[in-house]
Image (cartoon, grey):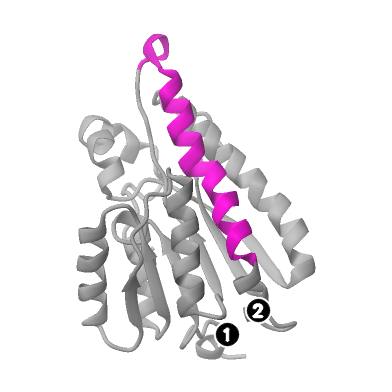
Amino acid sequence: MDAASLFNVKDKVVLVTGGAKGIGRMISEGFVANGAKVYISSRDAAACESACKELNALGKGTAHAIPADFYKLEDCKRMVEELSKREKKLHVLVNNSGSNWGAPYDEFPDAAWTRVLTLNLTRVFTITQALTPLLTAASSPLDPARVINIGSVDGLRVPNLETFSYSASKAGLHQLSRVLANHLGKRGITSNALACGPFESKMMKATLESFGEAIVAGIPLGRIGSPLD
């Protein structure tokens, strides 16, 4: 039971939503660098193509773009249809795509709830449900298919920042991951959530610029996350 075989992802088929930038890009690179066939999907088509070009230069695995705006249900369906045309099995689904919204409590709009909960929570279920047949086809008793949901420490703790809908959505995502684990386990599919801290990303850029020192001060290692993490 050596580490190389235990964590071998060579030739596995992986979908990373929001995989062109930020944490998703880091995850995509990790899979490609270790021999997986990775599909990257996000609404920025140019970023998807650029990320795939960079990742394919690494060798070992491959990266392929299927752009989609997950806020739009029809785009979710189109992405699933396209992936299903190309692949008969999906070994790993990484639900990483999401959104944030910061505004003072007295000005926090309903639109922030609609958009953030749709992207961070509803679409995780939408996409996982739609791809369950491909995940089931990839699973075996000793090597189940995997659903990995990218949560947040802000779904576990009470943050100081005014990110009401984001924190609530991630708390919901953690619970959804548990419910999915209970349900999908019967089909040979695992479901887990990663409660990530802050990483350098477009979504975090403004937050880190405004509150970076305070955020880092609350992290025992004294730094934000890096691709190696």
Real-space CA distance between mark 2 and mark 1, rounded to the nearest whole angstrom: 21 Å
Residue 160, visible in the rendered structure = no
Kind of residue sitting beneath label 2: Ala
User: Which quarter of the figure is the C terminus placed in?
Assistant: bottom left
What percent of the width, then of the height, locates residue 114? 48, 29
Residue 137 is labelled as 2
Find disc 1 in the rendering and name its residue.
6
177 in the magenta segment: no
How many marks on residues? 2
**Front in this rendered view, residue 217 or 32:** 32
x 39%, y 40%: residue: 99
What percent of the width, then of the height, locates residue 203? 30, 42
x 51%, y 73%: residue: 84
Question: How many residues crowd around disc 2 within 10 Å: few (fewer than 14), some, or many (20 or more)?
Answer: some
Magenta span covers which residues? 104-132
68 with respect to 110 (left or right): left
Kind of residue sitting beneath label 1: Leu
Farthest residue, direction right:
186
184 with respect to 35 (left or right): right
User: Which quarter of the figure is the N terminus placed in?
Assistant: bottom right
Q: Is residue 106 above or below residue 211?
A: above
Q: What secondary structure predominates along the stretch shown in magenta? A: helix
Q: Is residue 17 above or below residue 153?
A: below
40 with respect to 166 (left or right): left
120 in the magenta segment: yes
